[in-house]
Image (cartoon, grey):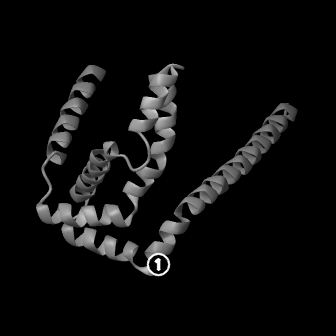
Amino acid sequence: MSRRLLTIAGILLLLGCGASAETPSPDAMTAARKLVVTLRIPDQYRAALPQLLLKLRSVVAQDRPEIEQEYDAMTRPGSDIYTPYFAAITDQIAALYAAAFTPDELRQIEAFYAGPAGQKYLEKADTLAQASAQIGQDVSQKAADELKQRLSEALRQKARKP
């Protein structure tokens, strides 16, 4: 029985992937690219890239100074080596957004993020996300502590009854 369910799930997954593989319209892609740039996604990738390259440096160079120097020269900030990757990340994420929203919806979302409230949100989003995650952890810990206390008390009460 479980094999049949897995087969059906696999077929549904393939059908779903096939449907989402449709190429978005040029209008949707234009609107989605504008949104991706407004959301500063390529900038986030640019900011994360130095850390990625620093980790990769030791793997590639393997403590050989001549390789390290060549690696540093090839990967220096502003190098043309990055240009196709910035374009690729923009296009691929834009395609994802274009598949999820209509061109009109994309323009509405972009208009919000391009405006003062959207820009303020983008500036504060990371801080808010971190603070929200901390609140979630704190509340979950309090809930777990209270549940533990209630269960302990219930078990003690049950143990006292004849």
At x 61%, y 53%, the residue is 133
Q: In which quadrant is the N terminus drawn?
A: top left
At x 60%, y 61%, the residue is 127
At x 56%, y 58%, the residue is 129
Q: Is residue 138 visible?
A: yes
Q: Is residue 1 visible?
A: no
Badge 1: residue crowd in 10 Å (few <14, some 14–19, many ≥20): few
Q: Position of residue 136 (x, y in %)?
A: 63, 53
Residue 143 falls left or right of residue 47: right
At x 82%, y 41%, the residue is 153
State which quadrant residue 38 falls in: bottom left
Residue 42 falls left or right of residue 126: left
State which quadrant residue 151 falls in: top right
Q: Position of residue 143 (x, y in %)?
A: 70, 49
Three-letter amino acid code of the residue under disc 1: Ala
User: In the rendered image of this protein, does residue 151 appear above or below residue 109?
Assistant: above
Q: In which quadrant is the C terminus drawn?
A: top right
Residue at the disc numbered 1 = 117
